[in-house]
Amino acid sequence: MEKAAEGGGTPLAVPDAAARVLLFTQAARAGDLPLVLNALSTAQLNAGIARLGSRVPEAVIDHVIAHGPHPARRTLAWQLRLPAPPPDVRRILLNPFDRAPDRDGLRDRDGLRGRDGMPDRDAARRRLLSFADPDLDRALFGRLEQVGVAWVRSAILRDRVGADGEAIVPPDLRAKLADFLGTAVLPLSPSHLADTDTGDPEFELLRVLAGARDLGLSLPAARVLGLPGPIPADQPGWRDQAWVRRWDRPGAGSRPWRLDWDEVLALAQDHESVAGDSGRYLGQIAGLDEAAAREDIPEDVRRRLLASYPQAAWHAAAPDVDTLRRISAAVLALHLDWHGFEQDPEFVGAIRDLIIRGLTVGSLTAAEVIGHAVPASAVLDLAWRDAEEIVPAARGRADLAEGVRSLLYQRIGDDLPLWTALLLRSFTWSGTVAELVDSTAVLGAEHVFADEDELEELVEDVAEGEYRDVPSANVLMAFARPHVGLELLSEGPGQMNELELELLKGRPLPPGLVARALVANPGAGARRTLAVNPVTPIAVLRRLLHDPVDTTNTRLSMLYDVADPGIRYAALELLEQSGTAWAQITQFAKGLGDARIYQLIAGAPNVERLHFLLKKFAKYLGPDTAALLYGRLAAEAGPEPVWDVAAAVGGLDHAVPFVRASMASGDAGPLLTAAEIAGQRELPGVTVPDPGHPCEPHPDDPTSWPLETAVRQHLDNRPDRWRIMVHRLMEAGPLEYAQLVELVETVGTVDDGAGEAVEGEP
């Protein structure tokens, strides 16, 4: 085997390489996960889990808990009790818009995320607690000064009991808690006892200890709190608004060690009359949703819960085809009070997350999702790839894409009228993908819309943006063969019609539709619409930068409108090179807003360029973004260039305080301190993503899944090849997405049975 690092460069450190392997498991089929993880040593597996922290994939967590070695479980327990990490200030200062992968070679995707910026891990914590293992308990309990783990501590000290009815507490942990009580004082007023999270670690710990089953812990804690005795465990309350509010908090159904299922059913039975619909989407109650998603819910309880609370249908620990069937029944039941909610983003998002969970853990297949999941829009939105990265449930989603493609080619083929009918029906379709495609093929284009007025009204609504949040038509069109996609919805080359223009604002962007917008004379606004769409592929945006029809105005428009910071910076450079007056450039740039001005300046590749752009645009920055950029300039070139910028922008007398402090001290310290403070703040578009201005350019062909396809062809159910693949990933340097594809294809050339010598083996 080659000893040089794959992809060039220095091989990654073991924790980063192991983390890359764990993230790569998302491209493998569920049945191959043990092959991948067993190819790692215990030390490597531990290092990968510790490196990823809250990003450990769901399937890896499930496998480690059920089958993993004890050290890996312990490492996982430590990671599950950690909060989300703060932003990397140094990275923000020195390279704020680097598109390169993280050090593990694979950037993290948002995917399924719950409280505290990490996936919902309450079930995993409960499963780890069920081992009653002292090492796991100590890890989950956390350091005494930690906050946010009160429910885990209550499970250890009160709720989880052994055969003798006593709490199972590791002796050394109990001794540490007793020592703490010996010196504890009341840090807050007892009035805070009702708070769910005071933020004070000592007070939270005292409150948990006062409810401990062990009187040797609970009585001293109660005395410190000034209470007459231990705090009793919560008892089912009277069925009133307070009772509902207690159940309507995040964690009410997922965090208790055991639930009183009679209480759950009582709330489900009365929730409408007690809670009402005010402010509740579909009348949902958080605790009931979480209770339905628990792995320990009895089947008879689930049946009774669904009868009075149909919303529980789309919450399950391991969703399977029966879950999907229950959702269809629940939708019909909810139609009496909530008509037409199937395309609402809240509902579609919940179904989408449920399907991702099922595909991730292998409890759902792509065929089952296509045949049984509703609405079709949620399914289709999972069948396309939004980045050159591995995403959660990547393999299941790639299989989903292949299933949709196969169904379309078999049932719709290249029939343009059928394709048109299919796209139009998809906007309002609330059934499954299979039903949508099959019924369109059976009815035929001429019979799909028997009422022409209905058809005209639908087209008008689509053109006016009524269905912009429904991606179905865009996704389906992206699956069409190239010649079909180019002709679909079009009357030929030339001006695009209003329906095409509306789809051009959506996501994903079908290659055929993009090609139509790039032909000569596509009509007013077509290219600008393409440019401002945050999912437009980068290659298309680069092509638009050199639009021969109206070069200067196109670049000025892209400087102002395009979501991608790199493209906006490229537009600025091209405008400068073409001799466009700075007065004209500034006229457009000054309306960008604080974050986008920051992004434009931060794109400077060197200190000279950074200094130049700050002198041009610093007057339009806010205090925090100015602090970040001044700090970067000072870190790279010292404080003098910052003083020069301040003098040029508004005069030293009007300089911000940290600049004046720097001048007074004669060094960069105040500038760097101000930058560090600003970097810890949540600044949309600067230190955290801006949900109002997303930038998510997708691949040229969003329905292709090259890495997952390569894995399917070359690695599926092949232990020897997986062993080699894991070894290569551990030995490789940084790898881009395309290099990962090449690596899989290279491993695929190894003959089955011949194997490849891995270091340390004969």
Image: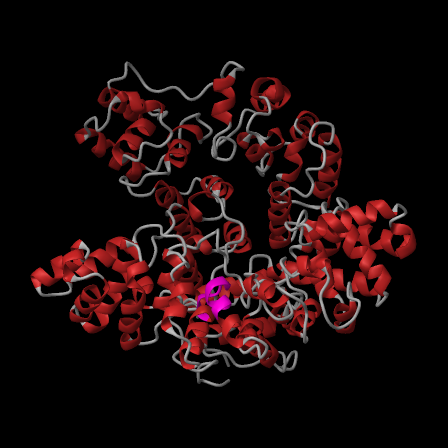
> Relative to the observer, which residue lies in front, 391 or 458?
458
Q: Which quadrant holds residue 616?
A: bottom left
- Name the residue: 44% across, 26% down: 164
Q: Position of residue 506 (x, y in %)?
A: 63, 57
> Relative to the observer, which residue lies in front, 584 or 624?
584
189 left or right of 693 in image: left
Q: How many marks?
A: 0
Q: Is residue 603 above or below residue 292?
A: below
Residue 318 seen = yes
503 left or right of 295 in image: right
Q: Which secondary structure type mostly characterizes the magenta part of the structure?
A: helix
Q: Is residue 232 above or below residue 617?
A: above
> Relative to the observer, which residue lies in front, 21 or 457?
457
Please give the range of residues in magenta: 556-566
752 left or right of 633 in image: right
- Name the residue: 60% across, 25% down: 277
Q: Is residue 609 above or below residue 227?
A: below
